[in-house]
Amino acid sequence: MAANAAVAVFDSGIGGLSVLRELQALLPNESFLYVADGGHCPYGDKTPAFIRERLARVAQFFRGQGAKALVLACNTATVAAAADLRERYPGWPLVAMEPAVKPAASATRNGVVGVLATTGTLQSARFAALLDRFATDVKVLTQPCPGLVELIETGDLHSPALCALLDCYLQPLLAAGCDTLILGCTHYPFLRPLLAQRVPPEVVLIDTGAAVARQAQRLLGQFGLLSDTASAPVRYWTSGDREQFAQVLGRLGFAPGEVASLPV
Ligand code: DGL
């Protein structure tokens, strides 16, 4: 793989853009290829086998495009498919995503942590292992959020439907006195403005976008793959509606980019 090749970034939809933003800020010389599996979004209620199958295809596509590394910017895809991808492509740097249980366990002052994530993430063995490893001394309340990703995908981050659903998912966590909230899905950092209006100021919100960007930087460095040339514009593919994806990019403040149909 050449150091000036692009880094692949994957999500079921627009959520991975919250990670792409951090990657671009930390690694301004890197070029990125972004795939949204919008035609199959949300992943939260799909079986692990289905997600693994999708990721096998997408990974092959990215390799065909010459990507030097893959950032799995999706918690749900990570729990279902990261191990499989690592086995298939042992020499290909892969950065995966997981809910920030460890940082939240250190950040909490009252020992009560809430996790907002997809059903698939929360039901996974990988998430259970994270809790066993890092959260034995704190109380962790998990809240699956069906329907939230679909509403975020529309790009309208202030719709009454989104506000109402978010309130409904936050209510039990706030009632239980969580002082730390894990945003365990890459779509949720886009809800920070809404969350700021809804949670008390002392509640700490944690997502892992910036940590994942630092991990990508470390891994590319280890493999001798950090680019030292200027970056090219991001190329996007979606298996969903291209027009809608392009519009949402603009609404989220990304530079307009070429959005192609994902051929797999
Ligand atoms: N953005 C995703 C995640 O981090 C997936 C959401 C979904 O498709 O349900 O989990």
Image (tube, rainbow, N blue to C red):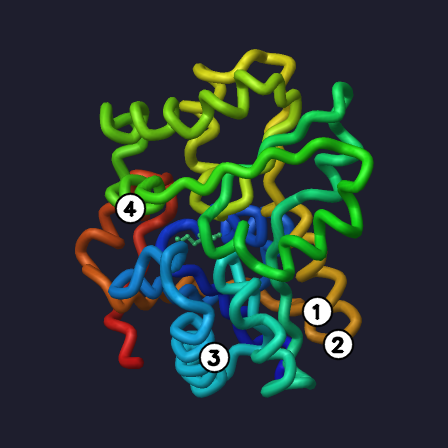
Residue 143 in percent (x, y) is at 50, 37
Residue 7 in percent (x, y) is at 54, 69
- For marks 4 and 1, give the one nearer the viewer: 4
Of helix, strand and loop, which one carries label 3? helix
Residue 70 in percent (x, y) is at 56, 71
- For marks 2 and 4, give the one nearer the viewer: 4
- For marks 3 and 2, give the one nearer the viewer: 3
- The residue under label 4 is 150
Kindly identify which numbered label has been placed on residue 220: 1
Amino acid at the residue labelled 2: Phe
Q: Residue at x 29, y 64 (%)?
A: 40
The mark tally for this picture is 4
- For marks 3 and 1, give the one nearer the viewer: 3
Q: Residue at x 66, y 35 (%)?
A: 140
Q: Is residue 258 visible?
A: no
**Does label 2 or label 4 sit earlier along the sequence?**
4
**Does label 3 or label 2 sit earlier along the sequence?**
3
**Relative vertical location of residue 152 with respect to residue 88 in this rendering, above or below:** above
**Does label 4 or label 1 sit earlier along the sequence?**
4
Disc 4 to disc 1, C-alpha distance: 33 Å
Under 8 Å from ligand 1: the CB of mark 4?
Answer: no
**Does label 3 or label 4 sit earlier along the sequence?**
3
Amino acid at the residue labelled 4: Glu
Disc 3 to disc 2, C-alpha distance: 19 Å
Assess disc 3: are there few (<14), some (14-19) or many (≥20) residues with their C-alpha within 10 Å of its C-alpha. Answer: some
Q: Is residue 208 visible?
A: yes
Assess disc 4: are there few (<14), some (14-19) or many (≥20) residues with their C-alpha within 10 Å of its C-alpha. Answer: some
Disc 3 to disc 1, C-alpha distance: 18 Å
Residue 111 quadrant: top right
